[in-house]
Structures are given as C-alpha cells and as structure tokens.
Amino acid sequence: MRDMNEDATAHAGQRAVAESIERGGGDGGGLSVTELLALVAQDAREAAVEPGAPGGAADSSVPDVEGLAAAIAKAAGRYLPAGHLAPDADFFDAGGSSVHAVELAAELERDLGVELELDDVFADARPVGLARRWLETAGAAASLALPAPPAAPAVLPAPRSGDGTSAGTRAESAPGTRAESDPGTRAETAPGTRAESALGTRAETAPVTRAETAPGTPTTADLPPLTATAAVATAATVATARREDLDQILADLALADRLPFVRPPEPVPPRRILLTGATGFLGGHMLLDLLRHSDAHVHCLVRAADVETATARLGESLRRNRLPWNAEIRRRVTVLPGDIREPRLGLSDELWHTLAQELDSVVGVAAAVDFLRGYRSLRRSNVLGALTLAELAATGRPKPLHHISSIAVFNEVGITSLGEDDHLAHVDRLVAGYDQSKWAAEAALRRARDHGLVVSALRPGGIGGHTKTGAHNALDLSSGLISAFGRFRTVPAFRHLNVAPVDWVSRVAGAVVCEPDAWGFDYNLTGVPQTLDDVVRDMALGGMHVRVHDWDEWRADTLARLEADPVPELAFLTRVLTSPTALKLCEATLTGPAAEGERTAALVEALGLPPAARYDAQAQLRTFERLADDGLARLPDKDDQPYLWFTETTEGTVRPLDGGRTDGAPCSMSLTLSLASMYQLVRERRLDVTGRVDCPAAHPEPLTVVRGDVWVRPDEGIPHRHGTKHQLLRYRLRLRAQDGELWWLEGHKYARARRDLWRQTRTLTVELGREGGPATLAGEVVVPADSYVRDQVDGIQVAPHLTGQEKRAAKLTWLAWFGLEMGRGLLGPFARAGADLLDLRRTPNPTEHHR
C-alpha cells in the first residue's frame, strides 16, 4: 500500500484509472474487462525493467534475484511431471505435492545453502517468491535489492467518449497490478503472463495494491469492522495474516465487481447441471445423489487432457470411494476435460457459450484442500475458479450457483458463534492459506449476489466417512485426527468437533441444488457437533479407552510416536502438526464454538430428509474399519486383555440322543464371559468365553473351554423358518479333556410368546458331541435365580487400569446395551404373535373353510 502522503499527482492518476475501471466498458466510457486485462499484462511486462534500461534505475540486485529464482526453479522442476518450472509459476499448481515441497526445501539447503522455513515454501511456492524471501530473511536484501522505484506508468488506451481519464494516465491499482509491498522489492511478474477471462482475471502477479475506487463504492464490505484502508493499514499491528496476502485478497474481491448484472433464474428443478470436483470425495457422492434424486443430466468438469483420460479418472475415483460407475450412470453423465484454474475452465469458446445457454445450474465443489499451502498458491483453484463459475452462471441464461464453501470461513481464534447468517471471521486474523482462500471466495460471491446472481453457500465442517460403506478421505484433517485418536489412544482437549458424515452432507447439498425454494441462502452442513465427552465415550464404546491431554502435550506426544514408529499414511498429519501456520488452523478448529444450522435443519425437515445425527461410534464403525485396513487406525483385537468380565454358572441335565437312557445326567457350567472391547458388541455382538464344563455323561473329568464365543441376538433374533422361538443368545464352545480329547458344545437361549420371561432369559438349551462328530447329548441348563443378579450385574469386573469414572461408564454402557438387546429379543415373539392374530390375509385351513 502507498503511504497516505504520497505524491498528489501520482495519486490523482491512480484515482482516474480506478474511476475508469468502475465505469466499465460499453456505453459507460470506461475500461472493458479485456482492456483491463491487457493493461495488467502490459504493466506487468513493463515492471520487469532491465538493469540500466530507460525509465528504470540500474539495480544490481535483479540479476541475483532472477539468478537465484532460476536455480530454485531448476531444482523444483525435478519433482514435477513436466520436468521444469517457470520462475514465476507455482510449484503446487504445476503438480508438486507437500512431500515434494519438503524434499525441495531440503535440497535447496543442501545444494544452494538456501535455508527456508517450510511455511515460507507453502505460503508462496513460486521460485521468484522464494528467492526474494530468502534474500530478505538472510539479511542480504539491503545489498542485493534496491528500494523499489516508482513504477513506470502504464499507458492506458485512449479514453472513450465521456471518459475524463487522460491518455497516458498510469494504473496503479487495478487487480493484478504491481504491489507496493516492502521497500526494496519489486513485483515479479512473468513476461507474457496470460490474463484470463472476465472474472477469473488471472494476471499472476506479485502482491497487489488496493484499487482506488470511485467515491462511495464499497471495497471490503466483508471485512468488518474495518474499511478496506484500515484493514490493510492496521494489518502490521493487529493482524496475523501476511501483508501481501491481504493485498492480494482485496484485489481478488474487486474482481467480483466486474460481473454483469443478471435477472433471477427460472425457479424450476434443474435438468442440466455443471458439477466440478466430481473426482473428489464429496463431489463424487454429490454426483450420485444428484443422479438418484433428480432427472438431471450432469456435466462433470474433470482435470485431464482429453475425454478418455477424464472419463477414466472419474470412474477410478468413484470406485475408490465405493460408488457405482455403470452404464446407467454413464448415460446421464457427460465428462468435460478442463481445469477450474484456467480461463473459461479450460474450455473452448464454443463449448463455453453452449454451456452458458444450455445449463440450468452450476455446482462448484472443486477446491484445493491443503492446510499448508499459502493463499497465493491456492487462489487460482479456490478463489478465481469460483469467480469463473460465477461468470459462467451469469453468462447466457441466468443460472443459480451453488458454492461448496467451508466452516473454515469462521476459523478465527476466539470467534464466539458460527451461525449461518453470522459475520465471517476477520480476514486479517486468518493465517492459514486455506482459510483465507475459502473466506475470499465466499466474500467475493456475496458481492456477486449484489449483481443479481443467485448464490447458495454450503459450508461443511469436517467431512467424516460414509456410514454405510466406510469410504473416507484419508488426507482429510478430520480423518487424520480421528486416526491418531484411535491409534494412540489419546485425544486433545477441545470444545467441539463440527463433523458430519459424507452421505448426509452430500444428500442435503444435493437437495439444495434441486429445490428452487432453497436457492440463494447460506447453509452450515455440519450436522450435530460433538463434544469432548462424546468422543471419549464413543471411543470407549468401541473398546478404545483414551486419555485426554492439553493441546501442546497431545501434539508433542503424537509427533514423538509418529517419529518413533512412522506411519506413511499419517505423514501429512506430521507436517500439519509441525507447521506454525497449520497449527493456528487446528487451534481455531479445536477451540471454536459449535456450529449452528437452523436453516439447514428447517430445510431437512421440510423436504423429509434424514435429520442430522451425531457422528457417533455406530456411524463411524465402518469408517474405523476402513481406516484400520488402510493402516491409519488400530482396532481392538480378540487377544487384547479384557477390560470387562463377569461369571455365569448354570445347572441342569442332559440325555443321550440315542434313547438309551431316559433319566437325565447332571451337567453344569462355570463360565467367565468377557469383552476385550465394546467394538465386539458394536460390530459382532459377541463375548469371549473361558471356564469349564462338568458333564460326567460326556467325560468323567471336567472339560476346559479352549475357545468360546457368545453371540447376542444372532441373526437379529429372527427365528428359523416356520419357527416360533426367537434367539436371544447363542453359545459355541470348544472343549478339551485332560487326556486331550476334544468336544464341542452348542447352546441357545430362546424367547417365546409366553409369560415366563424371567426363566427364558436364564434357560440354555445345549447339545454336546465329540469334535468332528454329531451331537450325542442334549438337555437344558439354567442360571440359578439367586446368582443371576449377584454374578452378572453386581459382579461385573472392569480392568483395574481404568479410572473410577471409566469403570462406571463401562458397566453402565454394557448393562444398557445388553438390557436393550434382551428387551428387543423378548418383545419380538409377542409382536409376531400379535401380527398373526391380526393378519386377515392368512389362508384359511380346511376346518375354517367348512364353517
């Protein structure tokens, strides 16, 4: 930004250019978008003044900066698919990954002596930006870089009729012009940088100065409570965001003002939809929901060079997320190779205009989700891409734009509420590039609403795995944290986790797209927030008893464990936990309030959709199993030490099945039923069994239980065909005598529509036989009434290493779960009997027929 008492002449010229921009092209006599982009590119080229060239002071530092940038670019190119990188190109946009960035930083330090913090690499991953920052931080800036002289004026096109701007007036402030950032630095813009289409004005320049707009024109309405000038002027004292990032954000917001004014779209369900991000986790699920719950044909924009590659990439991503990709889906999907980062989405002019006329709706899901990269590295995908979609929605026939935003727009430490209509965070207090980019995109689209564009902002929080398939996004921060919780059995103290399963988020988002009455509003798709107690209790239910640490202690412990026993699948979490910038994002996420979604809840109820439910242990079950399969989590094992157990004794008689003996022989069992984890109940509804069986009719010596299992309500308690006995429990024991002889025992507790319910819960029908042979003995054994409560309620034992509160929680959880299952099992026969009595469709028997 310029100083307030800068030269009045230059200031007047800047204002004249800005007023020309505000008037726009056409009859307004101002600059058109095309002319603005040409001006930006021209100014960028003229900014790169050769040393000693007319109009620019000889700057001995420029060759050093450019030479270092070229060396960094050469090193970076070895990590990219293309094998090379332009000095002003972004490393990540060119195909680099976070892992590659870490390796590049190590190589630069080793081979060039250029020591860069990883946060600097992620914040601005252009070689020229890295070169400049290293020269500044290394203390060499004073000798290598002269103070940036006033830039040579960029000559404007001749003014149109009615334009008060004189020819030759210099543009200092249009989006994309050179930033007046730190003294001694100059804007590094690649000669010939391509200026992109209208709203996606992608003049890839260095930090951009604020446009001096016409009097009364708002510039940062979405920066409460500061004005545009105050927001940037005070950034150095109260903000935590980088100065150059704020400059760039303000310039990007101004691009929304170039949108045309449009009339409202026709309020009918869409028949042709453009969907971006279909190869992503949420986007793939939204594609299937749009196809399932509407008659629309969906055009999917997929980043690829041709249709065949794009189609293959889409199919592979759907299958990876356990989604179908069959002929019926292909019939209703048109795959368009393109790129959200490119002008007009990388489409031809003909296809762009065809889509503009034929589409009914635009759905923007595509985004670069990386919590380490800076704003400059993410803006093309997350901000300019959103503005390009807004341009498409405003071109041709009016169309609504449904933008997948994020709850990250509130990621300011100390924010007090996350309501759907609450003010967004102060952008100068957002330090993570991802948070800044999502904020800037939503703020820019709010400006687009002022032009008549119907924009729906859909804000998911953390997106959990699918409750039915277990599909999950392994690189999502929520998945990484949950994986660490389950793997290391520790959690950091937090206030709330705003996480919802992907199937619910996708279903509600798809409903907004298809319901015209829902268009144009903001929705928090965060489900039911989880508290720390919820998470601890859910993990205990899954057999994963966790310890709670404060944030710093948990972070240090987790990093130490990951260093001692590296988990390749959690390498990204290590980078997040070691990045000061990403830690601010984590801090804001873990200390923030619960998100509120009254409008979302009302929409769900009005449309009859599944209501939001807490993403609890049952909902996470399949996801935890998938995480375990992928090496991201560790599930409880049968061989783990039990943490809850109780005894059961039974007495009764058995008889030979060959009919040789009519009186019963005594038989008793002394068993210990145990749980290695509640996961057994949630997933298998099974208990482990040890103990012995005393049955002289089978063997004179006691039989020891080698392996035993008890299933609670197997097969959901459904009786066998034409049967009236509903299964409550099933026992299966493998027994060994002292002489090594092996036996088996199969037992069942049944529920019937009779009044002796107490006895039914205690009576076990058993069969015994030698291993590999049929049953030779059968009978009944009963739990004595006086021992049932004593042993199986009061006598429950819990692992001694648990705290008193955890012991009580374990007992109550088991009793509540088991009592509910027994209640359901006993109710089943009576419900079936009642249904039989009321069933008028029964075929009459012969006796009834003749009455």
Image (cartoon, rainbow, N blue to C red):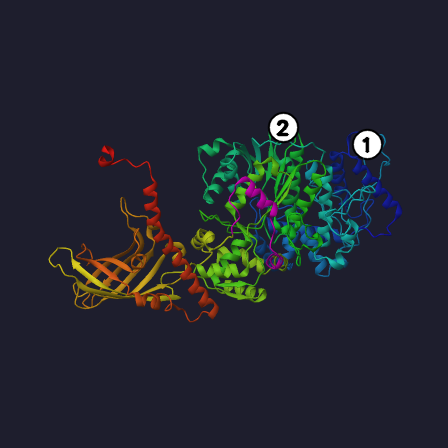
At label 2, counting other C-alpha atoms closer than 10 Å, the crowd grade (few under 14, some 14-19, many 20 or more) is: some
Residue drawn at (69%, 55%) of the image: 429
- The residues bearing labels 2 and 1 have C-alpha atoms spaced at a distance of 28 Å
Query: Is 797 above or below relative to 296?
Result: below
Q: Is residue 770 visible?
A: no
Which mark identifies residue 29? 1
Q: How many tags in the picture? A: 2
Closest to the observer: 329 or 372?
Answer: 329
Query: Is 782 above or below relative to 440?
Result: below
Circle 1: residue type:
Gly
Secondary structure type for disc 2? helix
**Left or right position of 197 against 49:** left
Q: Quadrant of residue 452?
A: top right
Circle 2: residue type:
Gln
- Quarter placement of the C terminus: top left
Q: Quadrant of residue 111?
A: bottom right
- Residue behind mark 2: 357
Q: Position of residue 282 (x, y in %)?
A: 53, 44
The extreme front residue here reads: 851
Q: Position of residue 461 (x, y in %)?
A: 58, 50
Query: Is 294 above or below relative to 484?
Result: above
Residue drawn at (70%, 61%) of the image: 138
**Left or right position of 693 against 638:** left
Secondary structure type for disc 1? loop
Q: Position of residue 187 (x, y in %)?
A: 74, 48
At label 1, counting other C-alpha atoms closer than 10 Å, the crowd grade (few under 14, some 14-19, many 20 or more) is: some
Q: Which residues are magenta?
A: 586-613
Tag 2 near tag 1, CB within 8 Å = no
Closest to the observer: 117 or 436?
Answer: 436
Residue drawn at (38%, 58%) of the image: 818
Q: Is residue 578 magenta?
A: no
Q: Position of residue 336 (x, y in %)?
A: 55, 34
